[in-house]
Image (cartoon, grey):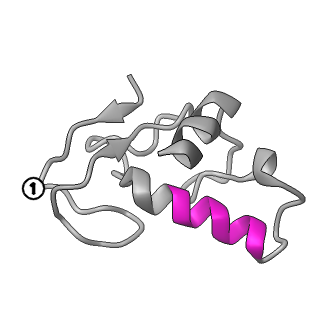
Amino acid sequence: MPHIEPDETQKCTICLENNDKPFYQLSCNHGSPESHPMHTECLKQFFQSQVDSNSVPGIAYVTCPCCRQNPASLNIDEIMRS
């Protein structure tokens, strides 16, 4: 399940904060508290920044901040709608 409840003992790989925000596990398995935890909100901002900076041709081409793999389109859709 990609949506993971907040865990205040884990720091987000992107914002380096530990707070009450939920995490999201991407199809590459990064994002969970066990593997490079990333808040859903931080992933959304990271993906949007890739598009805004023109480093990718569109939202469908965003990549995982850890491994640079392209997440499943379902992951991208869920994150951007959150």
Q: Residue at x 28, y 47 (%)?
A: 22
Classify 20 as above or below 76.
Answer: below
Taking the image as shown, residue 63 lies to the left or right of residue 44, namely right
Residue 46 is one of the magenta-drawn residues:
yes
Q: Secondary structure at mark 1?
A: loop
Label 1: how many Cα within 10 Å (few below 14, some 14–19, many 20+): few
Q: Amino acid at mark 1?
A: Thr
Taking the image as shown, residue 20 lies to the left or right of residue 35, namely left
Residue 80 is one of the magenta-drawn residues:
no
In terms of depth relative to the viewer, which is nearer, 74 or 11?
Answer: 74
Q: Residue at x 54, y 36 (%)?
A: 78
Quadrant housing residue 71 = top right
Q: Residue at x 67, y 53 (%)?
A: 68
Please, which residue is most extreme toward the left here?
9
Query: Which of the image's four quarters has the N terminus?
Result: top left
What secondary structure predominates along the stretch shown in magenta? helix
Residue 21 image position (x, y, % from top left):
24, 54
Taking the image as shown, residue 57 lies to the left or right of residue 43, namely right
Q: Residue at x 38, y 54 (%)?
A: 38
Classify 17 as above or below 56.
Answer: below
Part of the protein shown in magenta:
44-52
Taking the image as shown, residue 43 lies to the left or right of residue 22, namely right
